[in-house]
Each structure stands twice: as C-alpha cells, then as structure tokens.
Image (cartoon, rainbow, N blue to C red):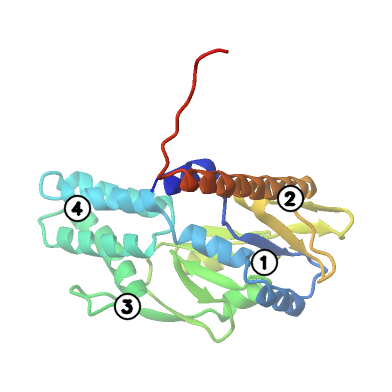
Amino acid sequence: MKTFILLTFFIPAVSFAQNILLQAPAGSKINYERFLAKHPEAQSMVQFEQKTIQSNPSQENQLFALSDTFSDRLEFVISSLKEIQKQAPLTLSSLRFVRDLSEKALTKDISSQDKKELLHAYCKAVTLLNEGPSHFVCREEYVALEKLAKKFPYHETLLIESMSFPLKEKSMASLSPQTPYHWTLVSNSQTTVRFYGTYEQLLNQHFITENWIDGDCDNFSHRIEDMNVLHRGTVFFDESCTPRLFKDESKKSWVMEKKTWLYVAGAVVLGGIVYSLKDKDIIVNTSLK
C-alpha cells in the first residue's frame, strides 16, 4: 500500500487527450480518412467539435437545479428555461431536462405567451429525442437536408442542438416547425458555422466559411482559436507531411515524454527499495564521530 501511494505521488499527471487532425485544402479527403483509420490515437476535427458540443456539465447542472426549485419558483424556472435554451446547444441530458420541465410547467396555470414558448421547447426536445409519445400536440415535419448539403459541400456533419446528422443529400431530420434550434455545421477542412433560429431562417442566411489551414507543408497559416486544438492539432497534407499546428510544440511534447519516462523509472526504482525494506527495521545513527 505504501509503495502504491508513493508511486501515485511521484508520477506526474500524464494527459491522454487525443491528437486532433485537420485536413489541409491540398490534402485528399480519401487519404485523410485512410490516415485517420490507421491512427486510432487521433480524432478528426468533426469528432472533436461533436464531443465539445455534446458535453456541457454546467448547462446540465443549471437545468437539474431548476427541477429542485420548480414548486417554489415557477416563474423563475420558466424564464430560466427560455434563457438557457438560447445560450448554447442542448446536450442529450439537457434535452431530457427541458422536455420534463416544460411538460410539467405546461400543466400549470401560466400565461398564453409562456405556454406557447414552452410548447416549442417541449416539442423541440420530444422530436429530437424520439424516445416515446408526446403528451401534448406537437406538429412535426421531416426535413430533407439536401439544400444544406449543397450549400455547404465541405461540411460533413450537422448538429441540431447536440444531435448529429450526416450532411448528405439523402439525409432527413425530424423538426418542430417554427421552432428555433442551435445549428452547427462542422468540417475537417472549413471553419465551423453556428446559427440559432428556425430551419427556414437558416436557409436564408449567408455564411462565409474559410479554410482552417492555408498554405503548404513548409509554410502554412491557420484560423484556429480554440486552445485545445492549438496544442493538440496536427495538419494533414499527405501521409508524408503531417506537421503540428505549433511546430515547437512537438519538441516540447518529446521532452515532456522523456521526462515522464524518467519519472516513471525513478518511481519504480524507489518503489522497489521501499518494498525491499518493508519488513526490516531501519536504524538511523545520528551521533557524530
């Protein structure tokens, strides 16, 4: 036990976060996907964006707290529900919270305006989750994503709130009409598109998207602002050219890796010494000769 505690204390924290692979415009999409398949230690930019949107503990905690105050502060719960929905895409757990809270609120004596907005929230959650029958009348429409796929040919995935849909001509999505959603279009090679509004409003917007990466293997620039991607990002030009976003970062990572192995080796040696002495009495002579 002592040895285990010592080892735990001695070995520094090691990050197991995956590298993030971005596709340069000159890089072939097919070769990019093949390269990813050969390197399970890496994830695509699309996968990273999906995971980021699908994880929001703060949002979930806010909604969970509302369920505890429902009986005493109904007006606060209703106003908070409206506000939280606008702030960021709802995670899977958040969609369930919104469905349950709005369903409960709709049974109370509330204003017609609140009832209208809560019904939109309820129907949005019910149609996206598709986990059972609706307890209120919800209009539902199946939307072909063909127009979006043609408008954004370099974006592979669409997230409606946190629910993921492949952005292909034959893809379909079930929506509540005239209901605002968080829309996120993600790509391995082009900047992310974000919009909050109805499907009709989304189609009428004009977005300017740019390459994540410009230039060639020896001299390139990027439009990455997320610090996670900056420090974990690798650019795919071809199989023989996959530089880090920060070229100095690779050297730093190599040095840190060597240090980590030295720490581990030192900890193992020290742990062995401790283990060999575990049943022995150690006498320390402090007298001076």
Task: Look at the picture and state if 171 lies above or below 40.
Answer: below
Residue 141, quarter of the rendered image: bottom left
Local packing at callout 4 (Cα closer than 10 Å; few below 14, some 14-19, many 20+) is some
Q: Amino acid at mark 2?
A: Trp
Question: Is residue 226 something that shows in the picture?
Answer: no
Check disc 1 and report its element: helix, strand or loop. loop
Check disc 4 and report its element: helix, strand or loop. helix
Q: Amino acid at mark 1?
A: Asn
Expressed as whole percent of the image width and height from the top left, the position of residue 153 reads: 67, 74
Q: What residue does disc 2 label?
A: 254
Expressed as whole percent of the image width and height from the top left, the position of residue 204 reads: 56, 65
Disc nearest the viewer among 1 and 3: 1
Q: Residue at x 19, y 57 (%)?
A: 112
Q: What residue does disc 3 label?
A: 130
Q: Residue at x 30, y 62 (%)?
A: 121
Q: What residue does disc 1 label?
A: 188
Which residue is situated farthest in the front direction here?
289
Expressed as whole percent of the image width and height from the top left, the position of residue 84 reads: 35, 50
Q: Amino acid at mark 3?
A: Asn
Q: Nearer the viewer, residue 90 or 153?
A: 90
